[in-house]
Image: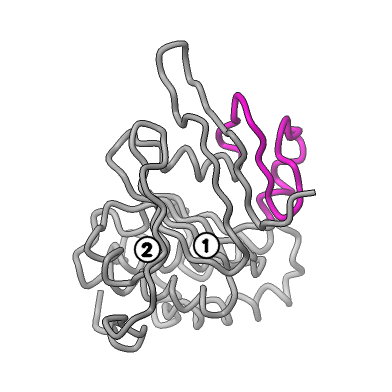
Amino acid sequence: MNTSFIQYEDVSVQYSPYVMGIDNINLSIEQGEFVFFIGPTGSGKSTTLKLLTREVEHTSGHLWLSGKLLDHWKESSIPILRRNMGIVPQNCGLLPNKKVWENINYALRAIGVPRRTARKRVIEILEQVNIAQRADAYPSELSGGEKQRVAIGRALVNNPPLLIADEPTANLDPECSLDIMSLLMRLNDEGTTVLVSTHEHHLVTMLKKRVINLSRGKIVTDDVPSLDNNYLAPEMYVYSGPN
């Protein structure tokens, strides 16, 4: 039985006879890691993450998550699988006609949390992602960074052991990008395994976490920087100004 939290064994995704999403990937990720996936558009980084959420199915190889073999996972069981992870899509995916607190509350109610418990949990989540001051705002009234905070908060409704973020800083200015990354770092410090696909190479370099570089569906490098004197502790790079 596989003992890693996440394990890819000779995993490939073939979209067509001429298009490979990923090609024979072997990869192990332990619980509590923070891992960046980088690479140009079409390199396979998003495909690699979408295999875990079952938005994409691998065509060969084997994939494990938390001891569960995901090969040929039943479609009817996918919602149950996703309840054990937090998913932050690139476009935020907020409900435009609901306020910030209602977006969080809707996610809680959708997974069966009782109304009274949900009210308390909404407050906890809003404070956790530092967006409580905007609880009554609609998504159209939020900055890009604020929207991402709400999206991350919504992904935390189940206290998931795994958080997957696909380009969470896309289209954000540098200060907002740093702010969002510092939030993800804090969640990781609390024990959440965090997987992030990104084009923000300057942030990747600054944060000094494990970096998996993909190109044409293959892993080119898999680097875990050592914590030397150049390491920046979270309190040194957190941006706390307005978004």
Q: Count neighbours of disc 2 (C-alpha within 10 A) and say few if under 14, some if 14 to 19, many if 20 or more.
A: many
Q: Is residue 219 above or below residue 184?
A: above
For the C terminus, the quadrant is: bottom left
Numbered label attached to residue 120: none
Residue designated by label 1:
103
Q: What residue lies at 43% left-to-right and 74% top-to-bottom?
A: 185
Residue designated by label 2:
147
Q: Is residue 162 magenta?
A: no
The spot of residue 82 in percent (x, y) is: 66, 50
Q: Secondary structure at mark 2?
A: helix
Mark 1 or mark 2, which is nearer the start of the sequence? Answer: 1
Q: Nearer the viewer, residue 145 or 12?
A: 12
Q: Is residue 6 above or below residue 45?
A: below
Give the extent of the magenta segment. 54-83
The spot of residue 205 in percent (x, y) is: 27, 66
Q: Amino acid at mark 1?
A: Asn
Q: What residue lies at 41% left-to-right and 18% top-to-bottom?
A: 19
In this picture, residue 145 sits left or right of residue 129: left
The spot of residue 18 in percent (x, y) is: 40, 13
